[in-house]
Image (cartoon, rainbow, N blue to C red):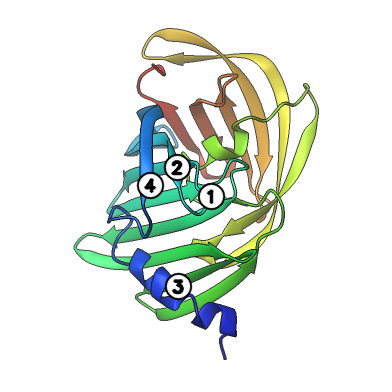
Amino acid sequence: MMRPIFLRFVPAVLALLAGPFGPAAVARAQQPRLDVGSFTITINGHRAGREQFSIQRITSNDGGTVELRSESAVGETRTAMRLEADSAGTPVRYSVEARRGAEQTLRLGGQRVRGRFATLARSVTGEAAREYLLRPGAVVLEDDGIVQYALLLRGRQLDEGAGITLPSLTPVANTQGAVRVVLESKSDVVVIAGARRVARRYRVVSAAGETRLVWAEAEGLLLRLSIPSRGLEALRDDVPR
């Protein structure tokens, strides 16, 4: 039996299932974009797909301050995502829609309410509802996400070798846990479209124990992501503007 707090919240979550790029459930004011661009994704050195994204500051009446949107295509799978978060990077609203060919394989919507985050997902295996306790500093990080790391790193002030552990939610996998972020270097170099960019290199260990290497500029603008265990690399197509 679902908990009463979720039952009261089902209409709002169902509204998000209308699609990750549909109208917002509440009024908001959009401001200039913080970042926009795309990543080319390779697996074992072979081009596998691409992810386009935008990040912009917003003002909504329930605490949202930043909005991430992305569309990715990897092989036959196409995914659209929208994440609205507060100033700490904690999710306020979240929606994901995935298709494989012409078949919709996942539609997920989630929203924060009273210190919890409620989700409702519809997939080829059925419908599932979940409610997570939102601990301070909690972030959304999916196993296949790229641009979500922008919120993880945004505003982090770490010394070389220092790290931080944050609560994490992985709604698509229906799990939660913790993610460990360690700043390994402040002076790496990433080459993007022939331009050399000084970058900070972070080691990120997900709740599932998978290690990712993430390169970003000092302001948190993403440049590159690597998942060594999968042979996956995501490199930005153009330098941030």
Task: Identify which residue, 117 or 198, lies in the foreground.
Answer: 117
Q: CA distance from mark 2 to mark 3?
A: 25 Å
Amino acid type of the residue tagged 4 in the rendering: Arg
Q: Earlier in the sequence, mark 3 or mark 1?
A: 1
Q: Which residue in the protein does label 2 denote?
A: 59
Q: Which residue in the protein does label 1 denote?
A: 63
Circle 2 or circle 3, nearest the eye:
2
Image coordinates of residue 175 in percent, x first then y, are 60, 65
Q: Mark 4 near mark 2, Cβ–Cβ under 8 Å?
A: yes
Q: Earlier in the sequence, mark 1 or mark 4?
A: 4
Image coordinates of residue 203 in percent, x first then y, are 67, 34
Image coordinates of residue 43 in percent, x first then y, are 42, 39
Q: Which mark is residue 75?
A: none
Task: Identify which residue, 10 or 102, lies in the foreground.
Answer: 10
Q: CA distance from mark 3 to mark 1?
A: 21 Å
Circle 4 or circle 3, nearest the eye:
4
Task: Give left or right: position of 48 versus 220.
Answer: left
Can the viewer see residue 39?
no
Q: Earlier in the sequence, mark 4 or mark 3?
A: 4
Q: Which residue in the protein does label 3 denote?
A: 120
Determine the secondary structure under disc 4: strand
Instruction: State the image quarter where residue 213 is shown.
Output: top right
Q: CA distance from mark 1 to mark 4?
A: 10 Å
Q: Which residue in the protein does label 4 denote?
A: 28
Determine the secondary structure under disc 2: strand
Residue that extends furthest to the left in the rendered view of this protein = 102
